Image (spheres, grey):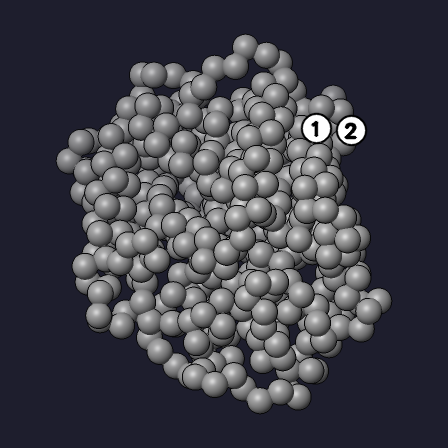
Amino acid sequence: MTTTPTAPASTLIEAGGIEAIPVDRRHGSPWQLFATWTSPNLEFATVFVGMIAVAYFQLSLPAAILAIVIGNALGSITQGILSTWGPREGLAQLVLSRTAFGLRGNILPSAINTVMAGLGWFATNSVSGTLALSALTHMPLWLSLIIVVIVQVGLAFVGHDLVQHFERYTAIVLGIIFLIAVIVIFTHAGDAAAPKGLGWSFAGFTLTASAAFGYAAGWNPYASDYTRYQEKDVSKLQLGLAAGLGDFVSCTVLMIAGAASVYIAFNGDNPTDSFVQPLPTWLRDLTLLAICIGAIAANALNIYSGAMSFLAAGIKIPFGLRRAIIALGFGIIGFFIALAAVLNGHFEAQYENFLLVIAYWIAPWLGIVLTDRLLRRGTSIAELVPDSAKYRNWAGPIALVVAGAISIWLFSNQTFYVGLLAKDTGIGDITPLVGFVLAAVIYWALFRAFKVRLGGPLADEPELIVGIDAADRAA
């Protein structure tokens, strides 16, 4: 007799941490991933990437659109690929990363993602939601921040199912509001003359593409966190398409709208106000509310996956609700970081630097984990990823550090540091591209040189790197 897995109630607190999800707890539809990766991008932080392209990198609208599309496409394709890895082992993304880094070596990417997700992105999106809520209600910034933080931490504290339900329903509401706002903005964008000095520059193009990639690919280290509950025989083609399209469509539409809004008006001191300025009052208020809710949707994922990354680093928490407790701790720490950012101001420069730093580490990490999966295709990795110190693979940490250091040293373009080859060359920032390629090559060479142990024979049909199974290929 067989039983159909049922989804636990979304209001029950998810117990445990990063353990593999057993078969009897698997549930969900692959296309729910479209909403999961649409909702968190329907916020002002996405819009502001497009604003940066025109207002700070001085690109014309067509050039900005092209850079935005390329950057988002690259980040969304990898989002789709990584999402297909969750169902086979039922494990989170940074736990699966252990095959390329080993248990000890995986502390490095897990720690980086913990800081970036649980603290960096948390503060960034909290500031965005706080500014919108304060503009809408005229509440003090500190009070608006408290409200935003309490809601998003509450969602992450309960866990996976409540987060998925929240993303599903907010995707519909936010999608409608932002669609109307985008149409109005594009209608008014044609009324104003193009800002002076806009055009094409290779530097502005690569900076915009890298920033867009950093934003879209910022979700990559979380990808399988939200597919590990899917059943093993789920269509990986549908799963990958749903996740990738959700990320790409939402990011691209809102970033382009942000770029177009600069043609109407731009206020560096209050970019949120610039975006909603052409909207009628009723739509302005709805859009501000949507920006606030979108920030909460994004941070529910950031806090949840930040806690998963913290546990993937090998931290031992002797409590049944260890994931929930860690999420609460991140919320408290993140609140004070966000409060400092709100009081300090200069959000645009901090945000630009943050997006590029995100791309600097994610690109080489991607090069390593994708190369690792390609080298292991047709093998089972279940024996390599449990909590065991017996498996080591130093090829990953070495490749990440070397590729990251070289690419940043030569090609980075930050306000606080410009790479040697980026100075006076007009190349902008190609650090992510160099880091990805260099890390993949170094890892491949070290994997062979170190004779890294492969997994055992795979009972199922061998998977390709994208995770498309035999049934999908036949279809």
Q: Measuring 23% from the left and 36% from the top, which residue is drawn there? A: 398
Asked whether 285 or 98 is in front, the reply is 285
Where, by quadrant of the figure, is residue 454 drawn? top left
Q: Measuring 79% from the left and 53% from the top, which residue is drawn there? A: 137
Q: Are marks 2 and 1 in contact (CB under 8 Å)?
A: yes
Residue identified by numbered label 2: 11
Can you say which quadrant of the picture contains the C terminus?
Answer: bottom right
Question: Can residue 54 be seen from the camera position used here?
Answer: yes
**Amino acid under disc 2:** Thr
| Residue 425, position as x, y percentages in the image | 22, 71
Q: Dot 1: what SS?
A: helix
| Residue 24, position as x, y percentages in the image | 67, 24
227 to the left or right of 424: right
Asked whether 113 or 147 is in front, the reply is 147
Which mark, by number, is residue 158?
Answer: 1
Q: Measuring 47% from the left and 61% from the top, which residue is drawn there? A: 212
